[in-house]
């Protein structure tokens, strides 16, 4: 074995997005593409740390969602780590660790940081997507200052430091040696399960399953399967088969591992059947997102966050009350109403879990969530799919109420925020940018303008000043807010790998219980027409409607 210094050339376009660097597998498998990015990361970690905190001699966590190229990437990163002074790597067996589990391991083992191999909810397989991101010592995604420094370094990196050692055995638990670095292959579930036991009433949950409570959890052939099986079926006694599509596959078995009513069609069909289980849920590729269902009843992520906030004291881990809550700007304001009722601080942040991380670390909030099926809490610094499932199970056990009953009672008390997201995927980048630029140019003229019965009271491009570190993030999404509380939001997504994705968010509030059972798209059709009038989406994109409406 020897450490080699190999010349390399920069690749264009290695700027991380809101959740790391995501590209097609064909891009990542180019010779030295992954190596360049990881070397740039290690160079920055060496340069940015104090002498006591530099990467040399530190422990890193490594794992991913098991998609195609995961195992190969893990071997490459281990050899780069060994050559760049890392003392120890905690590696999930088989290269597997869910994104929330990476955060849990970093925090419980007090690691320097971690590398997550995932493109989350994006498709997998040789023709699919791959991704990589760095999580800091708090367990959460790296701040933009670090990711921008990594991007800058990728543009000038000229050499790689890598070991020529043979591959290690990714599937054998225990210690192995790679150069002077220890590789500790760990059970991917152990640390995460320990955190869940601290938060939820496992005895209550065992009793529910013993009494015949039925659950269907769809892991979508992704990394959440082993966690859900180990905890729900193994530890809590749910019947075998409660977790379906539970084996992580490199191509997710052809499924699109994005838990929404469009992609989780199999789960939706089961929950609409005559013999439907009591509760249904799905997770995404790296198990950080969730979708929650009752019998023939889908819960929106925004309502889920609001309802969790309203009932948090029923959960052992939160029985002392919440410090505050936070949501991303495009997420429905449903949780805001609960926060006001409970006299809790409520923060509105840009999209991206790193913004929640600052609030969590500073003790400002306990729960947080995004409209893209992500909810989480102070237990880790990532959104967490299985945590959300256990929260909902514990809530049903504590109240004796079904999902639908809980949500409808919540609407009765707090009102309903009708809410939808329309995704226009794979559109030309120039067309998407031009649309946003032109709508921005119209913003000064919009306040006071009437659209039917509604009047615009605010039109802006959301900017956020972090209350913890004072950093400013601009151009985070265009907001149109109306005198009746309705909102229309335009935003370009940063998680795709082809073209651009325009996201249109529509929301209006309904306090009248008699008007709270309309079909969502029907209830928001007037706002959708208003958005088309403002932005001309159809003419600019050539699309007659959204690719996906959730």
Image (tube, grey):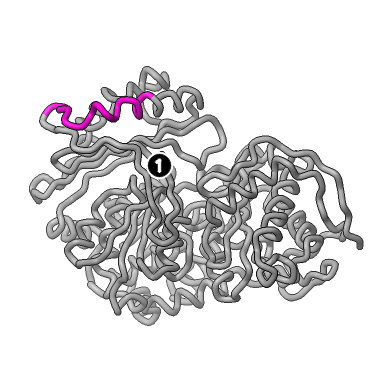
Residue depicted at 75% across the width and 45% down the height: 157
Q: Position of residue 310 (x, y in %)?
A: 23, 66
Q: How many marks?
A: 1
Say above or below: 291 vs 444: below
Q: Position of residue 529 (x, y in %)?
A: 24, 26
Say above or below: 337 vs 212: above
Q: Which residue is mark 1?
A: 476
Dividing the picture into quarters, in which one does residue 460 lie?
A: top left
Dividing the picture into quarters, in which one does residue 282 lie?
A: bottom left
Quadrant in which the N terminus appears: bottom right
Instruction: Give SS at disc 1.
Output: loop
Farthest right residue?
1
Badge 1 crowding class, 10 Å Cα cut-off, few under 14, some 14 to 19, many 20 or more, is: some
**Front-most of residues 10 and 29:** 10
**Front-most of residues 246 and 200:** 200
User: Is residue 403 visible in the rendered structure shown here?
Assistant: yes
189 sits left or right of 170 in the view:
left
Residue depicted at 49% across the width and 31% down the height: 500
Residue depicted at 39% across the width and 70% down the height: 363
Q: Position of residue 456 (x, y in %)?
A: 19, 34
User: Is residue 92 visible in the rendered structure shown here?
Assistant: no
From which residue to which does the magenta span run? 438-452
Say above or below: 310 vs 493: below
Dividing the picture into quarters, in which one does residue 112 lie?
A: bottom right
303 inside magenta stretch: no
């Amino acid at each position: 074995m020897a450490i080699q210094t190999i010349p390399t050339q920069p690749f264009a376009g290695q700027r991380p997005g809101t959740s790391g660097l995501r590209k097609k597998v064909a891009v990542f498998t180019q010779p030295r593409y992954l190596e360049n990015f990881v070397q740039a990361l290690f160079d920055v970690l060496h340069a940015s740390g104090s002498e006591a905190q530099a990467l040399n001699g530190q422990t890193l966590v490594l794992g991913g969602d098991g998609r195609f190229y995961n195992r190969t990437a893990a071997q490459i990163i281990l050899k780069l780590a060994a050559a760049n002074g890392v003392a120890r790597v905690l590696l999930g067996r088989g290269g597997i660790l869910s994104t929330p589990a990476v955060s849990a391991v970093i925090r419980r083992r007090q690691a320097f940081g971690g590398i997550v191999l995932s493109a989350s909810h994006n498709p997998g397989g040789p023709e699919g997507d791959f991704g990589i991101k760095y999580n800091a010592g708090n367990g959460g995604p790296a701040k933009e200052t670090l990711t921008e420094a990594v991007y800058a370094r990728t543009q000038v990196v000229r050499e790689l430091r890598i070991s020529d050692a043979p591959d290690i055995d990714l599937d054998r638990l225990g210690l192995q040696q790679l150069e002077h670095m220890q590789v500790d292959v760990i059970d991917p579930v152990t640390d995460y399960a320990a955190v869940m036991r601290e938060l939820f009433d496992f005895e209550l949950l065992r009793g529910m399953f013993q009494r015949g409570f039925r659950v269907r959890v769809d892991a979508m052939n992704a990394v959440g399967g082993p966690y859900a099986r180990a905890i729900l079926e193994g530890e809590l006694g749910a019947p075998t088969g409660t977790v379906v599509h539970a084996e992580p596959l490199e191509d997710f078995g052809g499924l699109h591992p994005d838990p929404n009513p469009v992609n989780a069609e199999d789960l939706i069909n089961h929950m609409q059947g005559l013999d439907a289980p009591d509760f249904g849920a799905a997770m995404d590729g790296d198990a950080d997102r969730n979708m929650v269902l009752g019998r023939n009843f889908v819960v929106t992520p925004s309502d889920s966050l609001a309802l969790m906030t309203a009932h948090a004291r029923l959960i052992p881990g939160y029985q002392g009350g919440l410090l505050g809550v936070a949501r991303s700007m495009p997420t429905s304001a449903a949780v805001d109403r609960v926060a006001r009722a409970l006299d809790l601080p409520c923060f509105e942040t840009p999209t991206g879990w790193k913004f929640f991380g600052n609030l969590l670390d500073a003790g400002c909030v306990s729960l947080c969530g995004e409209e893209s099926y992500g909810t989480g809490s102070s237990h880790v610094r990532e959104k967490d799919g299985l945590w959300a499932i256990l929260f909902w199970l514990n809530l049903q056990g504590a109240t004796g109420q079904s999902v639908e009953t809980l949500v409808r009672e919540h609407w009765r008390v707090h009102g309903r925020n009708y809410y939808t997201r329309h995704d226009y995927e794979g559109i030309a980048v120039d067309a998407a940018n031009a649309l946003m630029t032109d709508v921005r140019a119209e913003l000064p003229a919009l306040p006071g303008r009437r659209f039917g019965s509604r009047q615009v009271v605010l039109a802006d491009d959301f900017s956020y000043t972090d209350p913890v570190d004072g950093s400013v993030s601009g151009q985070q999404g265009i907001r149109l807010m109306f005198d009746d509380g309705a909102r229309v939001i335009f935003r370009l997504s940063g998680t795709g790998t082809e073209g651009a994705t325009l996201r249109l968010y529509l929301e209006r509030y309904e306090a009248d219980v008699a008007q709270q059972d309309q079909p969502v798209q029907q209830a928001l059709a007037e706002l959708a027409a208003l958005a088309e009038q403002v932005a001309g989406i159809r003419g600019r994109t050539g699309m007659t409607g959204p690719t996906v409406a959730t």
